[in-house]
Amino acid sequence: MASRFATYGLIALALLPIGARAATPPSPFPGPTIPGGMGVNIHFTDAKPGELKMLSDGGFRFIRMDYDWSAVEREQGKYNFDAYDRLIASLEQYKIRAIFILDYSNPLYDNGRSPFSDEGRQAFARWAAASRCAPRLAET
């Protein structure tokens, strides 16, 4: 496992000079831009001691994280965002921003498959609209 991470780190370091030399074309899309910085994918809401400091010290300014519908809505229409709120608060201490991916299915709807019925799609939309990450993303 550690050697796999070392290999990924070496690949990332090898690619840095390529990205540094490449000219950034102007964006065809008006509006806010993402400031410079590298990102990394994580799979936790509660970091172990020192993990976020290591990310920050390593120059990472963004994390990509799954925002798991079934982890937030365990009873129909009732949401518990506490784990994601803790993650966001922890990230803010290190000036790391989150890019959340609203995803997956929920066993409460459509037999646990990706939403396909009107009820399932509406439930996903209600959960996404209630998501606490949306206002925070708009503020940054």
Image (cartoon, grey):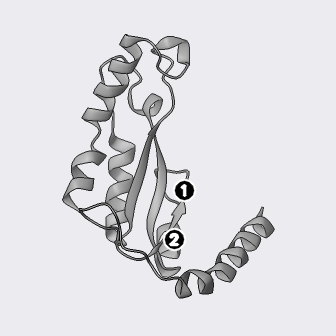
Q: Position of residue 29 (x, y in %)?
A: 31, 60
Read off the residue under disc 1.
Answer: 42
Q: Would residue 42 be found to the left or right of residue 31 on screen?
A: right
Q: What SS does tag 2 mark?
A: loop
The C terminus lies in which quarter of the figure? bottom left
> Which one is nearer the viewer's eye here, 26 or 59?
26
The residue that appears at 37% across and 62% down in the rendered structure is 90
Tally the marks: 2
Earlier-in-chain disc, 2 versus 1: 1
| Numbered badge on residue 85 | none
Does 1 sit above or below residue 58?
above
Residue 133, percent from left and from top: 30, 47
Query: In the rendering, at what x and y percent does residue 107 appear?
Result: 51, 18
Q: Look at discs 2 and 1 and give the one toward the viewer.
A: 1
Q: Residue at x 32, y 66 (%)?
A: 92
Amino acid tagged 2: Gly
Residue type at mark 1: give it: Ile
9 left or right of 23? right
Q: Residue at x 55, y 88 (%)?
A: 21
- The secondary element bearing badge 1 is classed as loop
- The numbered mark at residue 50 is 2
Residue drawn at 31 percent across, 59 percent down: 89
**Residue 113 as seen in the image, left or right of residue 95:** right
In front of the other: 99 or 18? 18
Q: Measured along the vertical axis of the image, is residue 28 above or below residue 19?
A: above
Q: Quadrant of the N terminus?
A: bottom right
